[in-house]
Amino acid sequence: MPLNSSVSANLYNPDGLPIDLGGPVDHPFEPMPASVLDGSIVDRFDYIVSRKPTRLAISDANCNLTYAELATLVNRIAAATVAAACERPGPIAILLPGNVNFAATVLGVLAANRGYVPLDPGVSIERNLQLAMHSAAAAVISVSELAGEISSMFPQQLPVVNVDALDREVAARHPRPGPDDLACIIYTSGSTGSPKGVYMSHRILLHSILQSTNSAHLGETDRIMFARSPGFIGATRDILAACLNGASLHVMPPSALQPAGLVNEIRARGITIFRGSPTLLRRIAEVLEGDQRLESVRLVHLTSERAEWSDVDICRRIFAPQAPVMVIMGSTEAPATSWFIDEAVRATAARLPCGRVIPDRTLSLVDDYGRPVADGQVGEFVLSSRFLALGYWRDPETTARVFAVSADDPEVRIYRTGDLGRRRADGLFEHIGRKDDLIKLHGYRIEPAEIENTLRNCYGVGDATIVIRRDDAGAVRSLAGYVEARSDAVKVSAHDLIANLRKYLPPYMIPAEINVVDALPRLANLKIDRVRLAELDAKCRALAGYTSHDSLAEEVAEIFASVIGVDRATFDDNVLSLGGDSLQAIKVAIELESRFGVAIPVDVFESTRTILELARWIAIQRRRRRHRDRRSR
């Protein structure tokens, strides 16, 4: 792969701006040269070990290793990997908790010139088996405590390397990997549909680390927090960001530490780089009291999900006031944009921008027909680069559907991200949402993320998400909100939340109902688990008594649909969810009063959230009227 190996090509983005603009420009560090891209991850690690043998490399609750000690463990794991896999082709599965051994095994497998597939002990055996089988793993590396799970996962004989029982003797050196050899296969979360294995070479991962190093000024004095599930790309990037720069990696698995514990660990370990999701940030902020700050953090790096201005406010409150806040938009396939947040932009941006395209990439916006859209117009992000993921492992059809090769340069791949956004006049990009999340309801285009963000800004709300309810034909019928209440706030009510939404959103964006729950279902990386959320929604609807055999509710729904002018209204609709206005609401109320002979006060009509609730209220009033009529005879 031909490369432009000059350092300057990786220190400035395509707009000619330095990638550390607004960041830690005064923080001394040793820039990572672009020449590392002509070697492997192992080459860079060996270079760091030779220069920093006695510095702390990695630490968890039970173990601290210097770079020299880590290199010894890495070489032992590499030798055991080579011996176990022998001539069997395929990557190596890693089933380990997120600790010192996991980080060492990642480097050890790479040193053995194999790609690795990280599994996660925190998920089901069935899912790990699915990933291991799909990857066609040649061996698995684990520990004694997981022996039972391994035997359940792999009914057929598969070589197992036990990190607890490695040979002390290191075998002779084996062939070293090159820059374009397979480095890893990272399976996406699979919250909807089957998981896909995104695979990358050493060069691709090194390019990502080069960018983060030179923008964040990472160096040997940094202490990087590791609080991620082993199965996600963020875990790999955290490990390499530390170990390829002489910094120290501090493992703090969120499964073992609640937010209060993370706060204590950040302070005790003097963490300088906070790398985590906005969700994790919000949880940590909840447990800090008064004016408490995490002063050791010099730089905040928000990843994995879209951040909001309210998250920036949290950062200013809980970290050192001068700590730069960096946001990145991207995916497992490739990071796309980054930005050290400039507060001056807030005056012209209701939505927090996701930054400018990072070096060695081209980012364009296209419509549904692949045509470029003008600045300010919404389009799909399309990324072009030599440093994108290579595709989806053992899935050529999906790879061909999502990736393409540039007609101008066969080394350049083109990736249709599925993300929607716009480019501002100042060159900053805004992320609008996922293309497959943008919906049309009763003729209106709606982005659920906008509703979610408005809910998050309501008092007492810790997090929020929207469920899209569809009919049997798959058409969008209504929206339902799910809100996770803050533990330190007064109890929030669905009625108050809907009233607050009405202040900021048009009527057609108001969910038909809102459910307040103690905790939203989450995946290991703290993102919303959409499968479990759908199951929760089905239970909530069942408990609410939604049924298709309520004749009065069906009659009420027909009136709503007729007056508002839609084809059909469901039991969980209301005037707002159907796109109706205040005048149509009055007409619906009048029609209902005429049809059922029941006067409907304005406050009752507005407070009933769904057609089913209103129908039940009408049924109660009719029963009461009949009872009064019998008594009066």
Image: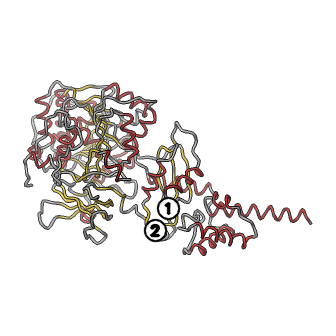
Nearest the camera: 579 or 235? Answer: 579
Q: Secondary structure at mark 1?
A: loop
Q: Give the number of the mark in front: 1 or 2.
A: 1
Please determine whether, in this image, residue 372 is positioned above or below residue 101: below
Nearest the camera: 623 or 122? Answer: 623
Please determine whether, in this image, residue 395 is positioned above or below residue 162: below
Give left or right: position of 189 versus 477.
left
Residue at horizontal 15%, vertical 36%? 45
Q: Residue 527, percent across and down?
A: 40, 48
Q: Secondary structure at mark 2?
A: strand
Q: Which residue is mark 1?
A: 506
Q: Residue 586, percent across and down?
A: 64, 68
Residue 535 visible in the displayed image: yes
Quarter where residue 54 is shown: top left
> Crowding at label 1, few (<14), some or many (≥20) Cα neighbours within 10 Å?
few
Quarter where residue 295 is shown: top left
- Residues at discs 1 and 2 in contact (Cβ within 8 Å): yes
Q: Amino acid at mark 1?
A: Pro
Q: Which residue is mark 2?
A: 444
Quarter where residue 315 is shown: top left
Q: Amino acid at mark 2?
A: Tyr
Q: Residue 189, percent across and down?
A: 36, 51
Query: What whole-number distance in Å separates the C-alpha atoms at marks 1 and 2?
Result: 10 Å
* Disc nearer the start of the sequence (1/2): 2
